[in-house]
């Protein structure tokens, strides 16, 4: 008996392939186009998602600095001085640049932030006493290594590209002003014997994110203004320091935020 699909007269059914597809079972041009479109949509979605995540982090950083400034302004109104530097809050004169009540957040260093001591260490605990809210209670004492984790943090974390936190200090190398310094502070020295603050290989902002933050809060220039790069590798900005190197994918920048710059100044 012949099959109704027998087109050869031999009694064997002949396999019929869809139009445009050979006996090898490959995809048609239409099917390939659909697959490529789907891949493109997925890839585009990933790019959009990454962009949205970075935008959210940028907004978070901006809000954090604004909150810090608002809390500092409230502290100044309430106590007549700066957190850490206020004699009302029990500031004790140290050595070199750590002098209470002089409007400078000192850290017992000589010319730049070196140690988590003195007024720098007491800045966040003082600010918290005056009403600044944070999920955990800050401590000025480092137990082994600098701590930004949820248990007894030394300073607040910041929503950067890589894990990091923010300390307050007086920055002599950039127009001499009180600033919030971002960085990976796990190597911060507390003994007074060290020569630096952080490892040169542990930066927390990618240039693209640093540019977005700087543009939103200031002038978009890494080497000037109220938001600037205070520590970097050579891949953070170009040789003249006027543009962020946004082609660099790694975190190569640490940003400095001038204190009280987001609420009209001191």
Image (cartoon, rainbow, N blue to C red):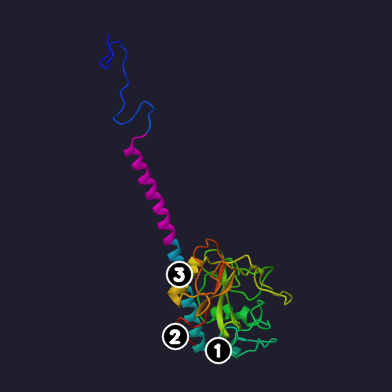
143 sits left or right of 52 in the view:
right
Residue designated by label 3: 212
Looking at the image, the residue that sits furthest to the front is 239
Nearest-to-viewer mark from 1 and 3: 3
Residue 44 drawn at (x, y percent): 39, 53
Q: Is residue 227 left or right of residue 169?
A: left
SS state under label 2 = loop
Which comes sooner in the sequence, label 1 or label 3? 1
Q: CA distance from mark 1 to mark 3?
A: 32 Å
Q: Which residues are magenta?
A: 27-52
Q: State which tag comes first along the sequence, 3 or 2.
A: 3
- Residue sitting at 65 percent across and 73 percent down? 197
Q: In the rendering, at what x and y percent does residue 124 appear?
A: 57, 78
Choose between 185 and 51: the one closer to the eye. Answer: 51
| Marked residue nearer the N-terminal end (2 or 1) | 1
Q: Which residue is mark 2?
A: 264
Look at the image and say whether residue 33 sits in the magenta stretch: yes
Residue name at image x 63 percent, y 76 percent: 140
Q: Establish if 89 lies above or below 10.
A: below
Q: Confirm whether residue 137 shows in the render.
A: no
């Amino acid at each position: 008996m012949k099959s109704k699909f027998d087109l050869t007269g031999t009694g064997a059914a002949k396999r019929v392939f869809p139009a445009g597809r050979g006996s090898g079972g490959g995809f048609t041009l239409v099917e390939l186009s659909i697959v490529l479109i789907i891949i493109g949509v997925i890839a585009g979605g990933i790019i959009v998602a990454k962009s949205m995540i970075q935008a959210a982090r940028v907004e978070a950083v901006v809000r954090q600095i604004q909150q810090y400034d608002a809390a500092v302004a409230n502290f100044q109104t309430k106590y007549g001085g700066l957190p850490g530097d206020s004699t009302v809050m029990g500031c004790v004169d140290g050595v070199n640049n750590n002098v209470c009540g002089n409007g400078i957040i000192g850290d017992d260093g000589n010319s730049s932030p070196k140690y988590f001591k003195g007024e720098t260490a007491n800045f966040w605990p003082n600010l918290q006493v005056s009403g600044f809210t944070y999920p955990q209670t800050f401590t000025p004492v480092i137990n082994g290594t600098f701590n930004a984790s949820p248990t007894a943090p030394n300073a607040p974390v910041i929503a950067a590209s890589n894990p990091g936190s923010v300390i307050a200090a007086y920055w002599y190398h950039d127009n001499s002003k009180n600033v919030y310094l971002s960085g990976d502070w796990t190597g911060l020295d507390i003994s007074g014997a060290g020569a630096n603050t952080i490892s040169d290989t542990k930066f927390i902002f990618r240039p693209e994110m640093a540019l977005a933050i700087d543009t939103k809060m200031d002038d978009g220039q890494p080497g000037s203004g109220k938001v600037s790069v205070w520590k970097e590798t050579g891949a953070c900005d170009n040789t003249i320091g006027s543009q962020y190197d946004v082609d660099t994918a790694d975190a190569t920048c640490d940003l400095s935020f001038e204190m009280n710059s987001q609420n009209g100044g001191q």
